[in-house]
Amino acid sequence: MTRPSPDFSFETAALATGALRIAGVDEVGRGPLAGPVTAAAVRLDPARIPAGLADSKQLDATRREALFVAIMDCAEVGIAHASVDEIDSLNILRASHLAMTRALALIAPVDLALIDGNLLPRDLACPGRAIVKGDARCLSIAAASIVAKVTRDRLMVDLAQQHPGYGWERNAGYPTKAHLAALLDLGVTPAHRRSFKPVHNILYQAKSVTP
């Protein structure tokens, strides 16, 4: 069964109502045990939309990297993060929304933000529309998902060099068997999310914390 491809229909409908500047917004990194949550806001030029945009989860790394370059070359892009400390203090949903609003603030003001998911950020500074599975339905959100995914994956490769042994260059901080085993063996790092259950449980079992 062929997966439906995202299209420009949400943007076209918004343009018809007079919204001239429209951005897609998505985040990556809600599920990992380590690292920030990363969001991107992308305003596509309708005349220069890169071919092959799709939900970042449906693309291999090589294709994502190529599309990342194409998007950065032809679109307005804002990229932002919410830190591990912010995730632990706010909760992952609010931290994700914080990253989204920060990403939007890095591009020129828009008339409408198309947000992946079923909730709009509390502090959204412009009109917004939440679109469930937006990264698979809306080209602007698909572009944002690719930018956020590539950016966060690169960041996790850098963090893996600072904290070797957890396999973040491969698992991006997600709770794979290898990552969970390393947590038990090596302990918790400053890049781990202490509010997430597997990390929290290890801390309360008095496992050593690496510097």
Image (tube, grey):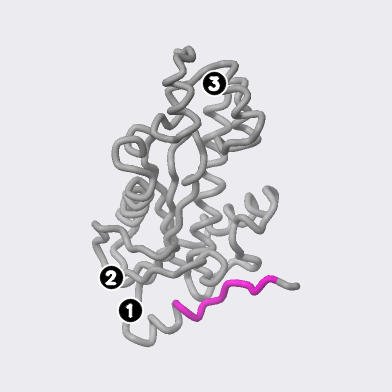
Q: How far is mark 1 from mark 3, CA to CA?
A: 45 Å
* 41 left or right of 126 in image: right
Give the quarter of the image for residue 53.
bottom right
- Determine which of the numbered discs, if any, sits on residue 87 in the image: none
Q: How far is mark 1 from mark 2, CA to CA?
A: 10 Å
Point out the frontmost of discs 1 and 3. Answer: 3
Give the quarter of the image for residue 49.
bottom right
Which residue carries the number 2 mark?
A: 127
The foreground one among 76 and 210 is 210
Reply yes or no: does residue 6 show up in magenta: yes
Q: Element under label 3?
A: loop
Looking at the image, which residue is at 45% across and 82% down? Answer: 12
Q: What residue occupies the far front of the structure in this picture?
A: 205
Q: What residue occupies the far bottom of the structure in this picture?
A: 16
The foreground one among 147 and 85 is 85
Q: What residue occupies the far right of the structure in this picture?
A: 1
Q: Is residue 197 above or below residue 58?
A: above
Q: For the residue marked with disc 1, what is the amino acid?
A: Ala
Callout 2 touching callout 3 (CB < 8 Å) = no
Which residue carries the number 3 mark?
A: 163
Q: For the residue marked with disc 2, what is the amino acid?
A: Pro
Q: Which residues are drawn in magenta?
A: 3-10
Looking at the image, which residue is at 45% across and 57% down? Answer: 26
Give the quarter of the image for residue 203.
top left
Which residue carries the number 1 mark?
A: 19
Looking at the image, which residue is at 51% across and 71% down? Answer: 138
Label 3: how many Cα within 10 Å (few below 14, some 14–19, many 20+): some
Residue 3 in the image, given as x and y percentages of width and height: 68, 71
Judged by its main secondary structure, the magenta piece is: loop
Callout 1 touching callout 2 (CB < 8 Å) = yes
Q: Quadrant of the N terminus?
A: bottom right
Reply yes or no: does residue 101 show up in magenta: no
